[in-house]
Amino acid sequence: MKVAGLLGALTLTCLLTGCGNESALRDGTFTGTGTGRNGDITVRITVKNGVVSDAGIVTQAETPEFGQRAEEEIFAQFLQNGSTQGIDVVSGATLTSEGLLDALDEALATAHGEESIAEVYEDAECDIVIIGAGGAGLVAATEAASRGADVIVLEKTGIVGGNTNSSTGGINAAYTAEQKRLGIKDSTDVFYEDTMRGGMYQNDPALVRTLVDNSAAIVEWLQSNIVGADLSDVGIFGGATNKRIHRPLGGGAIGRHLVPLLHKAAVMQGADIRLNNKVIDILSDDGRASGVLVTTESGDYLIHAKAVIIATGGFGANPAMVARYNAALEGFATTNHPGATGDAFALVSKFDAALTQMELIQTHPTVVCRTGLMITEAVRGNGAILVNRAGKRFVDELDTRETVSAAILAEPGGTAFLVFDHGVRNSLQAIETYVQQGLLVEGATPAELAEKTGINAYALAETLVRYNGFVRAKNDLDFHRTPESLERQLKTAPFYAVECEPAIHHTMGGLKIDTKARVLNTKGEPIPALFAAGEVTGGIHGAERLGGNAVADVCIFGKIAADSAADYAGL
């Protein structure tokens, strides 16, 4: 259970004990609310003769493919036990599970007679206030607090992590100890050129140089005792010349590994993280950012600070804003969490803050149709191929995301099938999440897989034979896929497929910053005491972000923003 998600609405005793077993519950129907991946989850429980007799969902916005499974498993245990004690989160649906458990706890507390009293915050002062508790905000909080700063982090939703929660790839870094250990030859210059080329040379060169030159150091920092991350597995993603995406052993999802560690690290260093606290204004003292105005369920309050860091993320979950900046993407689904709505851009208008490249919005090519659930690029990096309904490959699977997305959209129906075998599944732990979520179609043979998916069976078999020959020769004659990714033939049963479509994934544009993460105004001058990091900024990725560069961006510039803010504050 994520106790912090209830934001003081219940007594600690009730949360830890489950309430229902401590004394008789009041008869009646009671509701409670928690925060899931896609927003609030409201549940109801029915109590008869002091015992919970029924429970169910009132409202929720979770994806059916794994939300339903989490609901079934958790409600079954809850009705048997009468409390949430001992109920574990459902694998592959962590955020949904935690939201359900929080909601059930709140409903139990109400049935137990506990009043739901929102926490009241008073005006405060601190050294550094951070807006947003996603990856960049948590890194900034950890670093600033470790330097002795009094840090308050404000998160408008009920959970930490933001889009980083859903990151399944890894973090790009060059010339690292892990690469050297594995015999991988790479350099920051090659990393720089890959990133610039991937961004169609529309990137800010100075920001890209800062990214690549600090990449090995951030991996070392994340692996240190401060955070304790495992980044020992190194693979290859689209647009990369060499293997440089670092992730947990076995190719596990980076987000679900990193976010809890960063959250714990920030708290251990002394940062005050406040959920369900939305910043509605950034204070200005003669043009200097001097704090924030915050709104909560119990009212508004002020925080005065020596420096402000904006880490609110992008606007990929704001359809109106997406359409305003790039009309061609109107109506697209999104992989973004609901809080990615671009709030920060209105907050900084009083400072004449500069925005850059707002029209540059990336789609991710392999998103499960009608769900918004992304299949990590690592699946393709480890050997999966893309085929159309005719059973043919039609693109280099590891070309840039824009190119692969465009190729899929050009196919009939605008979708394609990601196809791989059990060898690929065994090579990448992240795939187990998709198995648990029920996203994959499985066939004992390619023919059976084709029958279940509607792919042309003869052509699929022919495609697999031809591709396996390319793997043996380390030479893709059809689409020139990078030889480093031609490691596994697709011939080990069973075989798997998932139908995919492109969806909005990352907004490359945002606040214009310099290499010290200072927010610049339209004259190109740093705005005093105002810093930013992560997807809320623009210029780093250019026209197209490479897979693995997002986590690098949020971590590297989150740390730089914290150091710059601490320096500004005289710490």
Image: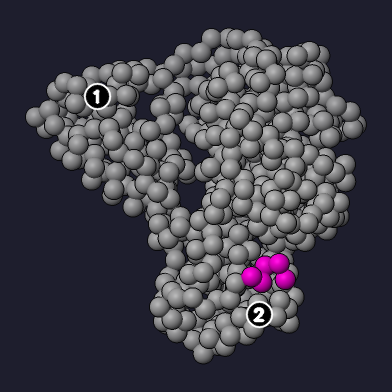
* Left or right of 456 on screen, residue 472: right
The span shown in magenta is: 483-487
State yes or no: residue 557 in magenta.
no
State yes or no: residue 486 in magenta.
yes
Residue 430 position, x and y percent, is: 51, 55
279 or 248: nearer the viewer: 248
In the figure, 192 relative to 129: above or below? below
Q: Are marks 1 and 2 in contact (CB under 8 Å)?
A: no
Residue 303 position, x and y percent, is: 63, 14
Dividing the image into 4 quarters, which one contains the C terminus? top right
Quarter of the image holding residue 509?
Answer: top right
| Helix, strand or loop under label 1 | loop
Q: Label 1 to label 2, Cα distance in Å? A: 61 Å
Q: Can residue 425 be spotted in the picture?
A: yes
* Left or right of 359 on screen, residue 426: left
In the figure, 124 relative to 397: above or below? above
Furthest toward the left, the residue is 49
How many numbered marks are there?
2
What secondary structure predominates along the stretch shown in magenta?
helix
In the figure, 222 relative to 166: above or below? above
Instruction: Please name the amino acid that badge 2 sits on.
Output: Arg
Q: Residues within 10 Å of mark 1 (few under 14, many from 20)?
A: many
Residue 424 position, x and y percent, is: 54, 67
Q: Earlier in the sequence, mark 1 or mark 2?
A: 1
- For mark 1, what is the residue? 19
Residue 472 numbered tag: 2
Q: Residues within 10 Å of mark 2 (few under 14, many from 20)?
A: few
